[in-house]
Amino acid sequence: MKTFTSDSLRETYLSFFESKGHKRIPSASLIPENDPTVLFTTAGMHPLVPYLLGEKHPAGVRLTDVQKCVRTGDIDEVGDDKHCTFFEMLGNWSLGDYFKKEMIPWSFEFLTSPEYLGISVDDLAVSVFAGDETAPRDEEAAELWLKCGIKPENIYYLPRSANWWGPAGLTGPCGPDTEMHIIRKAKCSPECNPSCDCGAFMEIWNDVFMQYNKTEAGAYEPLKQKNVDTGMGLERTLCIMTGAKTVYDTDLFAAAKDKLEELTGKKYDESPEITKAYRIVLDHVRTATFLLGDVKGIVPSNTDQGYVLRRLIRRAVRFGRNLGLPEGGLNALAEVFVEKYADVYPELKENSAKISKELAAEEEKFSKTLEGGLKEFNKVITHIPGTVFPGKTAFRLYDTFGFPFEITKELAEEKGYTVDKEGYEKAYAEHQAKSHAGSEQKFACGLADHKEETTKLHTATHLLNAALKKVLSEDISQKGSNITEERLRFDFNFPRPMTAEEIKAVEDMVNDVIAQNIPVVMKEMPVEEAQAQNFVGVFTNKYGDVVKTYSIGDFSREICGGPHAASTGELGKFKIVKEQSSSAGIRRIKAVLITE
């Protein structure tokens, strides 16, 4: 096999699909636009959902990119050999163009050709969908793999749990997939297959054949067009191609590891505890750097994406202290990651000052949090009978004061107590269940479903954005949005609360435009032309060379990929129901449309 760096692997993949007629598009934001079903972009296909559902993409029907992603469902597992919160996904798409008979041979070519990855066919196994009541057994994919040269004994039929992908949220495009695996060692038993966790197989690539749309009712309806969506994890593939044991042993982390060693005086492999702390600090600082530096960059807060970001930074501070990382050490590491990724994701360099400022501020805040937690610990432990520190109390220290369980355990043991870990985990699980239920309720309906009322509110959001610029300042820019069929939520930069007069002026301005029944006009044009015509495009780097623009008379001109009402007269009366702080320097408006 060829030897790769992270940069050469990205370029090899993109160039290959460019040779197959694909248009290279830039990574979308880590903060999903028009899809409140998830907090972060969790997969390469996520930003392309509208186009997989049938909307026309400005770049055409064959696309390829490297999408930055964040998954945070298993933050507590970071530190082992496998888990990372940030990762990059190499991908290519067919939007109603080619399908299995083209994609599978291309996959085989990229994996096995000496010009590309150069993996021996004898080291490859594939799995295909075994079929169920939703969709039939995928004999076509199996036959195509046989024609390519995969041995029959290395083709496995697996159930939905292993070979079905999607949707990314609660609803959306999905379908059977075929997965490609590296054979690493002999099977553990005759029944062993790529879904076994014995380590005999390692997945390297996944081709999803999107044929269905999952509805809110749970039904699977045929899509208007058949799509192909593939995903090859950059980090995992880099490990395979370089022989690295973990992603922390690749060039992606090399410079940051050196910097962390320089700052702490401790070696990465000095002990299992130090290795784990190294990985947590490196992973969390890298993810925080990308979240803070994103084109829709967020800041630490107590809700939604900001809460996850805060947790990542605080865990990095906590484990950094275990390593002896001095104050300001997170910033030093972030600077290394900015330099490492700047050529691929230039927004990191552009937002480096913000990254530094927010990391420093959160580190300072958490130091105070630790102090508060210590005071509370010393207060409650004097009232605990016996020698068992209650799990519920340990969780309250964590939930209320951000006091890590590990610290509670260490301090309790020093005073002769054992900690009820089972009680802590039970309290934690109950908290997670409540949070998950609340999240499902909160994000049950989003713009990605393109409902009529949601679409109207999306159009109203454009009017709101324009009105804020006219009433408050031309420097106003969107910092996030969440739109359901009941209401819109819009975050924007502004240093103080709006006055009652300002809120009324914005409402009146939006309602005046609605009353004029102005057509909403969509045009596609090169991004440079859109910028020259003063279209607002805070997130323009996600769209590529050609963009969709939406004009509402001379009042609003924006670059946008979402659905809109045909004219403003369809909207009804616009009413702001709340204006409040979202985070430092960011205000939040919640508004509704009232049918009169």
Image (tube, rainbow, N blue to C red):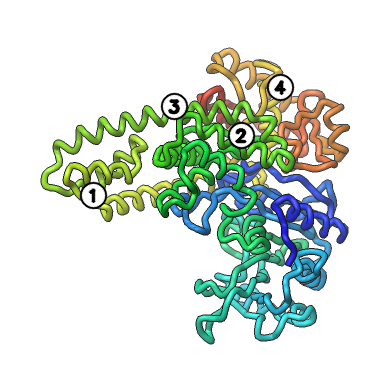
Local packing at callout 3 (Cα closer than 10 Å; few below 14, some 14-19, many 20+) is some
Split into 4 quadrants, where in the image is the C terminus? top right
Q: Where does label 3 land, which residue?
A: 364
Earlier-in-chain disc, 3 versus 1: 3
Quarter of image, res 222: bottom right
The image's mark for residue 419 is: 1
Instruction: Measure the alpha-carbon separation of dots 2 and 4.
Output: 48 Å
Q: Where does label 2 land, which residue?
A: 335
Local packing at callout 2 (Cα closer than 10 Å; few below 14, some 14-19, many 20+) is some
The image's mark for residue 512 is: 4
Q: Is residue 102 above or below residue 421?
A: below
Residue appearing at x 60%, y 73% in the figure: 184
Residue appearing at x 67%, y 54% in the figure: 89
Left or right: 55, with 388 as reference point: right
Q: Amino acid at mark 3?
A: Glu
Split into 4 quadrants, where in the image is the N terminus? bottom right
Judge by depth and name the residue closer to the eye, 487 or 363. 363
CB-based contact (under 8 Å), mark 2 and mark 4? no
